[in-house]
Each structure stands twice: as C-alpha cells, then as structure tokens.
Image (cartoon, rainbow, N blue to C red):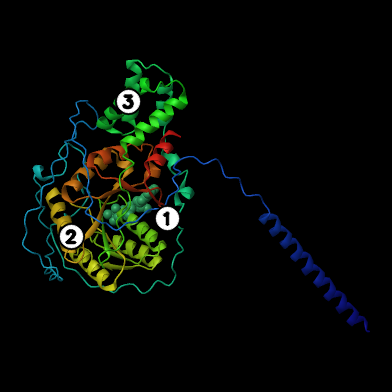
Amino acid sequence: MTTTTLIWIIVVVAALLVVALVTGVVLSRRRRISLTEPEPDKPAKGYRAGGAITFNAPTAPPVVERPEPEVVERPGPASGASPAKPVTPPEPVAPEPVAPEPVAPPVSTAPPEPVEHPVADRTEVDGQPGVGDDAAVPRDSVKRGFVEVDLPEQASEIDEIEPTEGRLERLRGRLSRSRSTFGQGLLGLLGAGDLDEDSWTDVEDTLLMADLGAAVTDQVVGALRAQIAARGVRTSDDARALLRDVLVGVLHPEMDRSVHALPHSGKPAVVLVVGVNGVGKTTTTGKLARVLVADGRTVLLGAADTFRAAAADQLETWGSRVGASTVRGAEGADPASVAFEAVKRGVEAGVDTVLVDTAGRLHTKTGLMDELGKVKRVVEKQAAVDEVLLVLDATTGQNGLTQARVFAEVVDVTGIVLTKLDGTAKGGIVFQVQRELGVPVKLVGLGEGADHLAPFEPRAFVDALLD
Ligand SMILES: Nc1nc2c(ncn2[C@@H]2O[C@H](COP(=O)(O)OP(=O)(O)OP(=O)(O)O)[C@@H](O)[C@H]2O)c(=O)[nH]1
C-alpha cells in the first residue's frame, strides 16, 4: 500500500467520523425537543358547554312564543327605545320575474341624484346610526340582473374540519375574556346576606352595566328579591346557585336551539343568513357550511350579498375550502335572483342544505323589507325557507338591539347568531335580544377562526359569566 493510498483512507475515515458526529448531535437535539413536557393545561375557565351544533329538519312551522311586551318605566339606556311594532306585512306586489332579469341599460356617467329618505321612513330617528347608514349607494337605487358566472372548479385542497363534537371544549376560555366583574360583583353583593335598598340599587346598576337592559334587569331583580329570603341565602355558594338559576331561567333553556338545516320532503333545507354589514354574516355562513360538511352533509352556498364583490369572493373561498359550490352574481346584481338561482341549483343537484348569505346595507326599512321580502318570496318558489338566522355583533350593544327590531319586523327571524362574543366584556345583549324578539340565540361566534362557531347553551353561558 502506497503512502498516497494510506492518506486517502485516513481522509475518508475522518470524513465519515465527522458526518456521524454531526448526525448524532442533530438527532439528540431533536429528541430533546420532542421530549419537552407539554405545558399542563391551565384550569379551564369560561364557556364549557361540550355539545355539538345540532341540526334538525322542521316537522312543523316553528312556533315562537313572544313575551308579552312590558311597559318599562325605568329611565335607562333601553327605556328610550321604542317597543317592537307589530310586523307589517309587505305590500302585495305583482309576481316578480324569477328568471334572469335584463341587465339595466348603461347608466350615464353623471353623478346619480341623491335618493330621498324621509325621516319617518328611516330605521332610527333618535340619533343612533340606522341600518346601513354607512352605505354609499342605497341598494334600492339601481338594480342589475343576475349574471351567470362559472362555478369554481372542484377545490384542489379540501380543508380538514375539526369535529363538531366537543368543539366547545376546545374553545373554552375564549368567553372568559368576555367575562367582566359582572359575576364577582353580583356575588359579592348577594352573598352579604340581608340587602338594603342601596345594595339592590347596586345590583341593578351592575346588571344594567352588563347590557342586560332595563326590562331584563327588572325581571332578574324581581326574581332575586323574591327568592333570596325564601331560599335563605347565607353563603356565597347559596348566592351563586340562586343567581345562576335566575339568569338561566330568563334565558329560557327550554327553547329549541337546533338549526333547521336538514333536508326534508325531498328538497334541501334553505337557510337565509341576514343582518347588517360587517356583523359577520359571510363568516358565519362559511363556518356553518364547515359544520354541516363535517357532519357529512352536502352544501351549496348562495352569495346574495351582491353589494360588495369581495363578500362573494370571501364566501366562495369558504366554500372551496370545504368542497361546497357557490352561486354568485355580479356586483350590484339583484340579490333575489342570486338567491333564487342558488336554491334552484341546490334542488337540481340534490344537496342537503342551501345557505344564502344576504346583504344588509339598506337605508330605509322599506328598502330592507322590499329586498329581504323579495328574497324570501322568490326562494319559496323553489323550496321552503326553513331558517332565517339573524346575525348580530355582540360588541355593538344597543345598536345591535335596534337592528334586531328592524329585521324582526321585516322577516320572520327564527334564530339569532351572536358573533364576536370573544371581543366584548358584556354578554348581556344575549338576554335582551332574546327577550325582545322571543327568538332563541342558536349559535355564537367566539373568534375569527374557521371553526370558532359554537352552539349557544344557556347554562354554560351563565357559568362563564359567573366564573
Ligand atoms: N373576533 C371575532 N371576529 C369575527 C367573528 N365573526 C366574524 N368576525 C369578523 O368580523 C369581520 C366581518 O365579518 P364578515 O363575515 O365579512 O361580515 P359581513 O356581515 O358578511 O359583512 P359584509 O359582507 O360587509 O356585509 C371579519 O373580519 C370577521 O373575521 C367572531 O365571532 N369573533
């Protein structure tokens, strides 16, 4: 063996040793990382309901018991609001064409005449923003017809969706961000035993501050006063149990909170999602589609929010991520045509559920009534509307309640979705809106994440407030 060969052998052996050394170091580091103890789960607080969102096919038209309107004399934030007026049936209209309407002739480039909105016709006259006040152009000013666009190709990558069962377990803690001193404050007052009038005033103030409104506050205080002596409340545990029972009671836990989104009579279920702009309608429609698909249902989405092109894009993206087709129209297209076409295609394709995302940018109650009424009438030529979900933003407080009243006068709302509950320190709007409309809160949005939609469970909600 020559010296050169010997040197080469030494070099090769040395190189092998270096490679082995480096590999060993890397592997040992990896092992160290994977061996790190996962942080133990912090004791969970907040919303702990563990049930899944339940879907149902209606067996009979939902019967909604509206609470008797109460005259509230207390001055307070809610007392100035006008009580809900009886639902005014829409003016009889000539049968509208449901086939694609002719596209409007080109509009002149001159700026459009401002549309008059008499004060009496506005949704709000007390200085609060009205429904759709931020709209630049009233929806009812110009109408364009339905425009056929290609449906998206089958999504190349379909999302994996978190199972709905036990979803709230994974979301727990989100609501705890929204809990305030509400529970602690009330328990402190009630646990003290005999309450003088000043303490009762403090109880009322705490309830009002949490956005429960004057009427619900009166109801809760009345029940507390009646029961505190009868139940012999002495300890903070007694106070907690009493408060929990009273708050759960006013939320009517017996109400049917299943979402009527299952097919029946050989036709898809039709769910209309309504609400003013920005409350989370499109997001909620997308999240709901995910839950249905995760439950093995086929879903078709109708992008009837034609006011903002991005809303249809947004919905289409939600759909393509779960393998649901979206029927959409051009920006400014007639929402009723889009809704009609979506339901028609849903019936033809034999899907289980058609979810229709509508628009809420309307300057006047009349405009809103015309448009949503038309959407509903036109859709019903194809299949019954099983659910009208009103989406409200929990962070808007009294304004959300004003919106709820207007929508309830325009369409038969069958369920409420309260979004952005993760972003408010006041959960009290839940109590007010249910009482006002006599319609159950069915779903809550607890975040922007795709799976941050959960069923509303009164007991879990109250527990979260009192945590
Ligand atoms: N934190 C939080 N954000 C939410 C929730 N639901 C919706 N959002 C956010 O609210 C914003 C508005 O949601 P959209 O779904 O676009 O609202 P929209 O009502 O369809 O609005 P328009 O299409 O403009 O009428 C988005 O940024 C959403 O991510 C929720 O439960 N929690």
Q: Earlier in the sequence, mark 3 or mark 1?
A: 3
Q: Is residue 406 above or below residue 297?
A: above
Left or right for 380, reference 160: left
Which secondary structure, mark 1?
loop
Query: Is ligand 1 within 8 Å of the beta carbon of the residue shown at mark 1?
Result: no
**Which residue is label 1 attached to?**
451
Residue 425 is drawn in which quadrant? top left
Q: Are marks 1 and 2 in contact (CB under 8 Å)?
A: no
**Which residue is label 2 attached to?**
375
Image quadrant occupied by the N terminus: bottom right
Q: Is residue 254 above or below residue 4?
A: above
Q: Position of residue 265 (x, y in %)?
A: 25, 65
Which secondary structure, mark 2?
helix
* Kind of residue indicated by mark 3: Asp
Task: Judge by depth and name the residue closer to the eye, 45 or 426.
Answer: 45
Residue farthest to the bottom, as pictured = 1
Badge 1 local density, few (<14 within 10 Å), some, or many (20+)? many
* Kind of residue indicated by mark 2: Val
Let me know if residue 102 appears in the view: yes
Which secondary structure, mark 3?
helix
Q: Residue at 46% across / 22% down in the picture? A: 235
**Which residue is label 3 attached to?**
205
Left or right for 22, reference 387: right
* Kind of residue indicated by mark 1: Asp
Disc assigned to residue 357: none
